[in-house]
Amino acid sequence: MVANFVQGMRESASKVVKSSFTMPKDVSCLSRVSAQVCFALSLAISAPLHAEDIDMPIGGRIIEGEGSIIESGLLTTIQQNSNALIVDWDTFDIGINGRVDFIQPGANAIALNRIFDNKPSEIFGQLNSNGHIVLLNSYGILFGETASVNVGGLVATSLSISAEDFMNGDYVFSDLGEVSGSIINHGLINAATGGNVTLLGGRVENHGLIAANLGAVNLAAGREAVLTFDNQGLLGVKVTESVLQEDLGVDPAVINTGDINAAGGSILLTASASQDIFSQAVQVGDMAEAREAIINEDGSFTLTSRSNAQINTGSGNQLTAGADVVNSGSLDVSTDEEGEDAGEIQIVGENVTNSGVLLANAENGNGGAIAVESRDVTLVTDNSVISTRAENGLGGEIRILGDKVGVLDETVIDSSGRNGGGDILIGGDFQGSNSAIRNASRTYVGDDTEIYADALNEGDGGTVILWSDELTYFGGNIYTRGGQTAGDGGFVEISGKEQLLFRGETDRSAVNGVGGTLLLDPRDITIGTNNDDGGQISDNEVLFTDGGASEDFSISAAQIVAELVDGDVLLQAFRDLEVDSAIIANAGNTNNLTLQAGDDLRINAAIDLIAGDLSLMAGISCGTCSDLGADLVIDSTLNTSGSISLEAARDVFISAAIGGSAAPSSITVRAGDDINLNSGSSLTSAGNMVLTAADSSLVADGFWAVSSASGDINFNGGNITTNGGNFTASTEDGNFDFNTGDISTGGGDFSATTADGTIDINGNDIDTNGGAFLFSSSGDLDLDSGDITSNGGTINIRSSAGAVTLNGSNINSNTGDVLFSAEGNIEFRDGLVTTSGGNFVANSASGYFDNAFSNSDAIDAGAGSVTITSGGSYSVSGVGVYLGRITAGSLSVTTTGGSISQYTFAGQYLEINGTTTLNAGANSITLDVTDNEINGPIILTNTGANAVLINNSVDTTLGAVNVGGNLTIDSQQGLSLTDDLTVVGNAVFDFAQNNSNGNVFNVDTGLTIATGSLTVNGGTGNDQFDIGSDIGGQLNGDDGIDTFNILADVVTTTIDGGGGSDILVGNDSVNTNTWVVDSDNSGTLTNSSNVVSFSNLENLQGGSGVDTFTVTANLSSLDAGNGNNNITINNGGDVTGAVTAGDGDDTILLEDSTASAIVGSIDAGNGNNNITINNFGSVTGAIVTGTGIDTIVFTGNGTAGSLSTGAGDDVITIVDNSSVSGLIDGGADNDSVTITGSDVTITLGTDVANTETLTA
């Protein structure tokens, strides 16, 4: 097959090869002369032929422009006085001893010499000019071996131009309907530096030497062409109509066997119509530069051919049918100038054969560019050398293109450079995908060919691409080595779109860098123990066939391991790729392995690398191959300390450990549909980890673990499901991102932990179905959307060094606990936490806690407890804990770095059915939401001078309270103190403000107001104040009938009854309660050494002990209680209601020189009472005693309405103008009434009843 391939290519180009041996004889047969003249001329050339020694130009006459012609023997001088000049000649021959000089105004001057001979002009002598000269002879021009041409610039052509076009600067040349004559050089043509030499005709040959340093040399065969000068005077050529090869017979249109030197300039050999050169440079792959095309400004030229009768090659450029070009000589645009880049060489034709030397080397700059391109066959053969080498710069660019491309024999192609290798394209560009580079149908590189794109000292090796759309054969050697001191190996692609035969070797090594890459291309690949196609991968890669290969490819795992020693390995299959034998390359190299398949990729055996990257891709687009929607199946372990990338167009199935023995630097898993994590699968990474199921789910059948030592772990795409097993993901230093759909463990635990990173939840629901849930991070942890449900298991979300943010997620433990912990802040920006009876715990070590960022945030623990601790605070507000909507059996909040507060969003309130414990350290506590429903005891601790405010809509019970600043309690119902209460600042208790039914304020334990005051404010209802401890401070009633109960001996306080008929009740103390009313409804109550000061208390009530009342001001009523009481009302004191004594032995004295009065009655009770009314004292109502022995005395104008005693021997004495206006009823037993003194008035009712003794 190989032999047939090469033979076919050689037969296609046989006429080109043959012509190279018959060039001299057949040259003139392209001219417009007769057969006899043609035969004679061919003999003369082979002789070699030359003009007579004395031949000189004849018949010269100036047609346009100004000048003169001076003939002097063997010297003819043309004196040109205008910038453009046209001279017509009958003949223009120069014998070997002859000389013609053009003396021109300057280097840009141009002289057209039209020669009307009937045979070719023969130049064997000297031709000199300081400007440009054009020699035009339609029969052709021959420069003999003795010719010496030294000019500023030369155009030698057999194509015609009109005088008008020439004088107008329109240099359009064309033949006269027939193929014009040949332009042949055997001599020396030398242009001035920066000058030009153009040989343009129906056929062009160079067998001599042409030199144009920094200039342009053009050998162009065609029937029509356009010439243009750029600003620097460089001449460009565009062939607009080609000579067809069929018009030339077997002979090539352009032949070079000589030497052409254009150091730093350009050389063009073309026999095909060129692309448009006047608008822009042609972009051709990596070699695209403006100077590669012929344009007005820079004089460079195109690599391609375009004209009428275009033929589409299918890719790359369109070439017209043209003629052949043969070069067996030397074309050299090299330069050794400092900082100067080498020039360009281009050879374009129908068929192109090069067996010569093409040089675009640079000694102190970058290498140049060389392009050899044909429409049909391009052959580089024999011992050809093509070089764009740079000894102190970057290697240049080389392209060898055509429909069929052959690089044969011992050809050397070199684009090496000291600072980096160049680019070499043979048959096409990368994967044949560059539309600007035409692709070969077949490419052959022979066994003895050497191709170099090395970096000689430092820098990376270059690029070498061998391509064909059908069959590529490679049997030579390719080198893209990295620099000796620094640099990586280069890139080599050897690809046949339908078939590849790889028999050569490549070297992409780098002694001080990373080895390069090689690509080859089969259809299906099997990696096993056999090596059926091992010869096809002498180095490192197998590449897609973009349209389907005709051969499968098998290679042993051992050979892949061997190739990994020198560089990266890339295997690409159009259809399926399967690994059936373990690839164990874990020693001696750090290179990368990439396996890619157009359809399924299956790993049936382990892959173990030491440090290289591992990439597995199934169903990946590969140029023109179709995306088959394939699967990636991992049934065996993958290990490397480099990165691991797994990608499938459809599903990824993982049933083994990935990164088990060697933690990869990162792991990426991407599926177009599902990622399936089967039983026994695990992912372990030292760096980042990303799992993306683009459209569907991540599914794990059993326990599944993902771990990363220091990188990020990202889950993207659809749902994550573990069917009954645990899901465990961990990373040491990286971050977690869950950008997924629903996550479900099927009853197993879900755990995602990072020791030093962040966690961000951006998906939908997470459901452990009864298992525990753990998010643990040292960095920030964000739950941005979706619900988390444990259905009984514990939910644990923690960040050891960062913050935790609930930003759209709802958390449901369904009887399990929910635990939040963070070194930084814990924020509920939009989310609901529900434990359904489980406990909620949040601990922010050095940040703040906030579950009130919006009115949708809430914590619902049901009957469970809520515990919140904070060690920091908002930087602006200083709040350590912001409380929002919380429902719980109990609440405990502790802060050390900030205050405790509530937002006032609608619906943000506390509903606590058990104990609420608030400890703000030295900071304030502010629960100022009127809807709070705190039903259990409230325990408050505040050690600093900051205030504490509690607002509650139900009965408020204060437990132990220790407040270092001011304390304010706003209770919409009752208020009770059940434990010690200590307040350093002021204390204000407001309760029942909105309850007209009244409520109770109860103090039954110690209450200490250290330096401030206590104020207790009742509401508008009938409030009850129960004071069971020394509270100090101020108790304030309101408009209702408030009752103040003093329940302890040691109460010191100030009471203001406010509006209404309020009551003050003394305690049942063994000590004496001493009451003093010294202003209206106001006075003091003293027990032991404690004093209760009161005001606006209309009704006083003693306890069961001994109460002593002294009333010297107005009072509504007085109830002395059941003890042995003493009541004194004098000095104008009035009691508008009743005075009541209990069952003790009471003493009641009503006397006052200003007529103190009891508007109501006196009920002395059942004790042995003593009642004295004198000094104008009066009792408007009745005086009633009980069953004891009572003594009642009226003296000094005392008055009473009526008098009634109970059982007992009562004694009643009325003296000194006293009076009783009503009935005196002695009751049972032996009672006596004695009336003495003067002016005693007794106004009896109907009688004196039940009185045994009446003395008057």
Image (cartoon, rainbow, N blue to C red):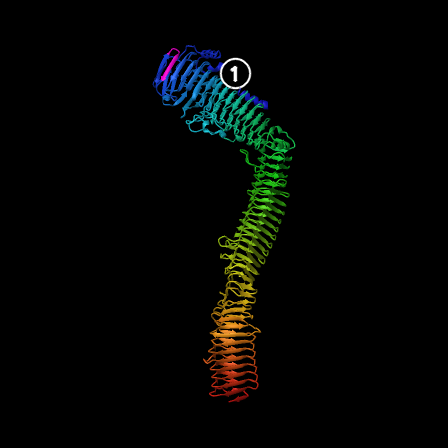
Residue 120 visible, this orientation: no
- Identify the amino acid type marked 1: Phe
Q: Circle 1 — which element? A: loop
User: Which class describes the residues within 10 Å of circle 1: few (<14), some (14-19), or many (20+)?
Assistant: few
Note whether 930 is above or below 280 in the view shown. Answer: below
Residue stretch in magenta: 72-79
Q: Nearer the viewer, residue 687 or 140?
A: 687
- Rendering coords of residue 1139 (x, y %): 51, 78
Does the segment drawn in magenta span residue 549? no
Note whether 617 is above or below 178 in the view shown. Answer: below
- Image quarter of residue 833: bottom right
- Rendering coords of residue 921 (x, y %): 54, 57
Furthest-left residue in this view? 66
Furthest-right residue in this view? 529
Q: Nearer the viewer, residue 215 or 833?
A: 215
Furthest-bottom residue in this view? 1256
Residue under label 1: 21
Note whether 1056 is above or below 260 in the view shown. Answer: below
